[in-house]
Image (spheres, helix red, strand yellow):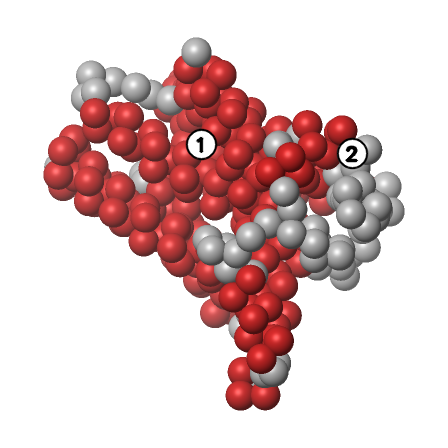
Amino acid sequence: MEFVVLIVLGLCAGSFANAAIWRIHEQSKLKSKKPANWSADQRMKTENLSVLRGRSMCPNCKHQLAAKDLVPVLSWVSLGGKCRYCKKPISIQYPLVEITGALLFLASYIWWPFGLSGFVDYARFGIWLVVLTGLLILFIYDLKWLILPDAVTLPLIALVVFEIAFRGIFQEGPEAVRGAILGMLTIGGFFYVLFVVSKGKWIGGGDVKLGILLGLLLGWPAALVGMAIGFYSATIIVIVLMLLRVVKRSQHIPFGPFLIVGAIIAMLFSEQIIGLYYELLLY
């Protein structure tokens, strides 16, 4: 029963992520114009594009969607990947992100390090699912537009700081804060140095904020594991893509998705990975 609930929640989280990705991008395009010059229609569009208050609509014709159009995966499949109203294709991104959300929620439950704390462990797990949804948004957004929006990153940082305080009070004490600070310095500090040295050419400010977020989230030494996985996976995949001539040497490659994948793996398996590392190193 727990698996069914988590799959449904994950599908809904993926659906929310899809909507948020499109709405945040549309908002950014509107906000690029001076608000003082906005027409009443533009102001109404901004309100309709609110992630929390706006009604779901087709990204092509902007027709408001009914409940039958919003069933994760099934609505897309039943309509043949097209809008019910304008008949234009709806990207396969939508069902893929929804399925990914379900798989991530289920995997998180299976491998989450539940201990003896009961309420505290489940509260932390609930916060993790919210953060995981935000990371899914950042993953797709950076992959599509090479941007990590502050509208997602900054609230997630605030939520993670709350989780650290919660964990410090009810579970780990000062160790929770110390580990979080070390983790933040590991990823966020390293990215900040790269940003300053390169004057923003190697990585952007969004990557620095993502590094701060993931460093706080993972703590020490999991932050080091997540960053290592991100760097190694990015290096291998980019080299392969360059050899296949899919990407060019001068082409900008988003690093955020690699770091996010590394962070998710580290969050669930850092202890096992560190244990395996020491075992191989010692023996």
Q: Residue furthest right?
A: 245
Q: Nearer the viewer, residue 266 or 79?
A: 79
Q: Does 37 appear above or below 47?
A: below
**Disc 1 residue crowd, few under 14, some 14–19, many 20+, Cα 10 Å:** many
Tell me residue 29's x, y (percent): 63, 70
* Residue drawn at the location 46% of the way across and 53% of the way down: 52
Q: Secondary structure at mark 1?
A: helix
Q: Residues within 10 Å of mark 2 (few under 14, many from 20)?
A: some
The CA distance from mark 2 to mark 1 is 38 Å
Does residue 140 appear in this view? no
> Measured from the top left, where is residue 99 in percent x and y?
62, 29
Front one among 229 and 56? 56
Q: Residue at x 65, y 52 (%)?
A: 64
Residue 208 position (above or below residue 166):
below
Q: Quick check: 29 left or right of 152? A: right
- For image coordinates 65% across by 46% down, the residue present is 65
Amino acid type at circle 2 is Leu
Residue at 40 percent across and 58 percent down: it is 154
Name the front one of labels 2 and 1. 2
The amino acid sitting under disc 1 is Ala
- Tally of marks: 2
Q: Residue furthest bottom?
A: 36
**Residue at label 2?**
79
Q: Quadrant of the C terminus?
A: top left
Q: In front here: 182 or 218? A: 218
- Of the numbered discs in the image, which one, if any, rests on residue 266? 1
Circles 2 and 1, Cβ within 8 Å, touching? The answer is no
| x then y, percent, for residue 226 | 46, 38
Q: Position of residue 28 (x, y in %)?
A: 59, 68
Q: Secondary structure at mark 2?
A: loop
Quadrant location of the N terminus in the rendered image: top left
In the rendered image of this protein, does residue 124 appear above or below residue 209? above
